[in-house]
């Protein structure tokens, strides 16, 4: 009896302690970064004719049909009409790649087709062509819910991503969660802290004057807390992307979004 | 998550007698001998650091410039305060207006040196600490956010924030 009571008391204490440490955002409280933007920026995202990212999408469309590599094959040659074959695809990335025995994000998946199927060199991280192809493929999922695959092989990578997300780091010693779970909606030097969702990427960032991938955004947050950013394509970036995707499951894809 | 603050309290790690520290003030600029990590040792008494880290009072004008600078002090990323020249507002932390009434000099010094002493979960960085950190940008490793002189300038400024 005594032990039971002690366990119960302990449980009560933990239950009470949890809200104080804040924590994960309940599904009904999830908000896209879009909601915290000015009306001007929202209008820019909503109208393809003024969204600067449209230029990248059009470039991506042209690249989709261009033959490349020693195989002299275009993406379209194998995949046909992207509006059909790529619909909903980037909404479920990162996904497990058998040969890599690890999850790959959508940009890495594009490069796998370059090396495996086109006999071409991989496109450099954040290069115009890679970002354009990714924005074009992402555009085919716009309005669809993020759906990270329910693949048991992803479990250890998700756990790694979550550990990275909740770990304090950098000279400023903050975790992603301390800003994006515990302090979203507050003002940080005039910027509203967003919940940190990945649903708009690749997107046009006004500060970049360019379209960039989710890894580029994560790099910005890491340097912001004076932490050493990972090298592009490092497994830890993909683990973080995977966790962010699962955390945003069900949110609608906005690619290519606009952010300040 | 950081370790419990008691395990890294510099007061526990270095037990230099106060007399030696006093002597150091007389003979050198530093109030206390340097610790292994190169930082000046300090003593926590009743949730405060009563003695200046440099043995000298800080300069409030320089302190204001540090506090109001979002790249150097970073304070205004989280706090608001009497900074009419800043065109943005932050509300991750309490407004600093009147903090000189609410906290003693020693309490202010401990708050800035190691905010985690009062609250291990705090989002406020410990400005004078280099241990227990992860993946710090290589060029900044082993360097505290503010040096001892800057800490004293900030404390001198916070003391003037009276209503």
Image (cartoon, rainbow, N blue to C red):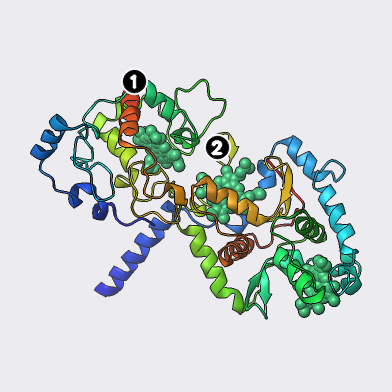
Q: Nearer the viewer, residue B142 or B113?
A: B142
Left or right: where B144 falls relative to A135: left
Q: What element carries label 2?
A: strand
Mark 2: give few (<14), some (14-19) or many (20+) Cα within 10 Å. Answer: many
**Residue B66: x, y in percent?**
42, 29
Left or right: where A102 falls relative to A133: left
**Residue A121: x, y in percent?**
76, 68
Q: Mark 2 points at which residue?
A: A187
Left or right: where B149 falls relative to A168: left
Q: In which quarter of the image is residue B22?
A: top left
Q: What element carries label 1?
A: loop
Is residue A193 in sight in this rendering? no
Which residue sits furthest left? B19
Image marks 2 and 1: residues in contact by CB distance under 8 Å: no
Q: Which chain does the numbered disc 2 sit on?
A: A
**Residue B99: x, y in percent?**
35, 27
Work out which quarter of the rendered image holds the N terminus of chain A and state it: bottom left
- Which mark, by number, is residue A256? none
Q: Name the residue under label 1.
A: B162
Question: How many badges with numbers are in the image?
Answer: 2
Q: Quadrant of residue B60?
A: top left
Is residue B151 in sight in this rendering? yes
Question: Relative to B35, is B7 above or below?
Answer: below
Q: Which of A233 and A145 is in front in this view?
A: A233
**Residue A56: x, y in percent?**
82, 51
Q: Which residue is drawn at 74% across and 62% down?
A: A123
Left or right: where A247 falls relative to B114: right
């Amino acid at each position: 009896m005594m032990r039971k009571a002690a366990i119960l008391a302990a449980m009560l204490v933990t239950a009470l302690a949890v809200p104080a440490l804040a924590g994960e955002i309940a599904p009904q409280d999830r908000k896209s970064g879009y909601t915290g933007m000015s009306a001007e920026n929202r209008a820019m995202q909503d109208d393809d004719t003024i969204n600067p990212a449209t230029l990248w999408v059009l470039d991506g469309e042209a690249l989709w049909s261009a033959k490349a590599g020693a195989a002299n094959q275009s993406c379209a040659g194998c995949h046909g009409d992207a509006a059909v074959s790529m619909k909903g695809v980037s909404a479920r990335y990162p996904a497990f790649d058998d040969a890599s025995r690890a999850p790959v994000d959508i940009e890495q998946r594009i490069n796998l087709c370059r090396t495996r199927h086109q006999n071409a060199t991989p496109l450099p991280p954040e290069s115009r062509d890679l970002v354009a192809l990714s924005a074009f493929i992402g555009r085919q999922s716009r309005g669809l819910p993020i759906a990270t695959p329910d693949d048991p092989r992803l479990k250890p990578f998700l756990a790694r991503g979550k550990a990275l997300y909740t770990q304090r780091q950098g000279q400023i010693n903050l975790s992603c969660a301390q800003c994006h779970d515990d302090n979203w909606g507050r003002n940080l030097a005039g910027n509203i802290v967003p919940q940190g969702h990945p649903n708009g990427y690749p997107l046009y960032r006004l500060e970049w004057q360019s379209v960039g991938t989710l890894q580029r955004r994560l790099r910005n947050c890491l340097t912001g807390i004076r932490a050493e950013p990972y090298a592009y394509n490092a497994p830890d970036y993909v683990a973080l992307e995977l966790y962010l995707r699962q955390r945003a499951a069900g949110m609608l894809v906005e690619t290519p979004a606009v952010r300040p | 998550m950081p370790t419990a603050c008691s395990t890294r309290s510099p007061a526990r790690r270095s037990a230099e007698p106060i007399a030696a520290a006093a002597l150091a003030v007389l003979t050198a600029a530093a109030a206390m001998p340097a610790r292994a990590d190169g930082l000046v040792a300090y003593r926590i008494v009743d949730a405060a650091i009563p003695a200046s880290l440099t043995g000298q009072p800080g300069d409030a004008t320089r302190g204001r410039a540090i506090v109001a600078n979002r790249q150097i002090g970073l304070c205004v990323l989280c706090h608001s305060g009497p900074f009419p020249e800043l065109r943005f507002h932050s509300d991750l932390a309490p407004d600093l207006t009147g903090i000189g009434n609410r906290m003693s000099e020693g309490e202010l010094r401990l708050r800035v040196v190691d905010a985690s002493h009062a609250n291990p979960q705090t989002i406020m960085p410990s400005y004078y600490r280099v241990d227990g950190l992860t993946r710090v940008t290589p060029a900044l490793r082993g360097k505290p956010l503010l040096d001892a002189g800057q800490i004293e300038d900030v404390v001198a400024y916070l003391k003037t924030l009276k209503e």
